[in-house]
Amino acid sequence: MSSTFGVLFKISTWGESHGAGIGVVIDGCPPRIPLSPGEIDAELRRRRPGQSDLTTPRKENDKVEILSGVSDNGETLGTPIALLVRNTDARSSAYDEMQHTYRPSHADYTYDAKYGIRAWAGGGRASARETIGRVAAGAVAKAVMHVLCPQLDVLAWVEQVGDVRCEVESDKVRREEVESNEVRTADATSALKMRELITTARSKGDSLGGIIRCVVRNAPAGLGDPVFDKLEATLAHAMLSIPACKGFEVGSGFGSARLMGSEHNDAFYMEGARVRTRTNHSGGIQGGISNGEDILMRLAFKPTATIMMEQETVTDAHEMATLRGKGRHDPCVLPRAVPIVEAMAWLVVVDHVLRQQACKTL
């Protein structure tokens, strides 16, 4: 059950980084939704390794195979959809030294502590390669939302790498700008500075973390199921399950702790027949339910744990050791994490839209 997410639109991911392949089973997708492999591949291309010199040089085509749930004419059947992406460029020998030695800040020790066994080659399920299933499922969720709620859109971008910050307001960010640079940030000047920072860190054998901002635009009011499935609680669950994500906030987030109620409250007004707020400190969610304004999120990502520097560690025999990183790794996960964040947002939104439809029907 730990590999399953969602209530009505439910996904189960499977596969290891250096296994035969990675995949996902989607249950609860409505029937007669137009869906093609090309739509899924387009999102996987944004996540795949080897897309620039800022990412891991591992070369994978990451082409999806639709095994079930979609008709020959490209419509969903309403039955479980099984998607497979095969691994073709795994090099397990690069991890031989890690078979008995725990990598600092990786899941090596904790997986051993939990299961008494681990997939040491490539990190197994703890590898970010597991997110292929999430991105593929997110592409399906996006296709469903284009039918159920075509005005809704999800957009994420790199807001900060290290101490370099992109100062563009959320409502000004456009997808074309984000996808025009390798860092996936919102303006060209920031992109150059971030690129230089990542390149320098890689040349030193080190790594960097940063912040991704995500906005859900044109979401309808009424999404979210209090009290334990509040919309921000589900989003937090989704986002904090992404590898390397260590922090999450909605709207004013931790900044709200410094404000007075008179400063933080979002005053209501009428725009025709629509209820609006003059500010959006709530980040589009009040009482755990969307209010129709943009849903604003920020996610903090830690530096990549594998670095090409010698570090102190221990072995699975509890002996002291030193270890220098090997293999192919991203010096900064943020550029490739952007489509993963978007995918998880699509999965949360489609699930809550379907739940809201059920609520209104009852």
Image (spheres, rainbow, N blue to C red):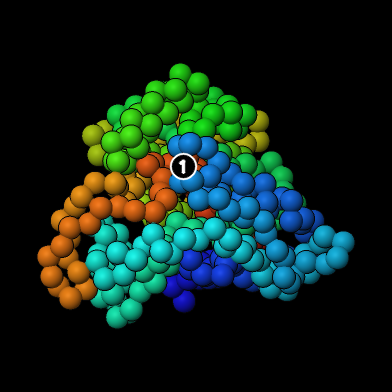
Q: Position of residue 54 (x, y in %)?
A: 45, 37
- Quarter-of-image position of residue 80: bottom right
Q: Nearer the viewer, residue 4 or 68?
A: 68
Q: Nearer the viewer, residue 130 or 322?
A: 322
- 273 over 222 or under it: above or below: above
Q: Identify the image quadrant of the C terminus.
A: bottom right
Q: Specify whether 355 is left or right of 167.
A: right
Q: Residue at x 72, y 70 (%)?
A: 67
- 28 over 141 or under it: above or below: below
Q: Name, please, the residue furthest toward the bottom.
A: 116
Q: Name, please, the residue furthest toward the left.
A: 320
Q: Residue at x 56, y 66 (%)?
A: 22
Q: Which amino acid, mark 1?
A: Thr
* Residue highlighted by disc 1: 55
Q: Residue at x 29, y 80 (%)?
A: 116
Q: Specify whether 185 is left or right of 317.
A: right
Q: Name, please, the residue furthest toward the top.
A: 189
For label 1, the SS is loop
Q: Residue at x 52, y 48 (%)?
A: 49
Q: Nearer the viewer, residue 18 or 233?
A: 18
Q: Position of residue 58 (x, y in %)?
A: 50, 50
Q: Specify whether 270 is left or right of 157.
A: right
Q: Position of residue 248 (x, y in %)?
A: 36, 48
- 98 over 164 or under it: above or below: below
Please indicate, yes or no, whether residue 213 appears anywhere in the rendered image.
Answer: no
- 119 over 268 or under it: above or below: below
Q: Specify whether 163 is left or right of 173.
A: left
Crowd class of label 1 (few under 14; some 14 to 19; many from 20; radius 10 Å):
many
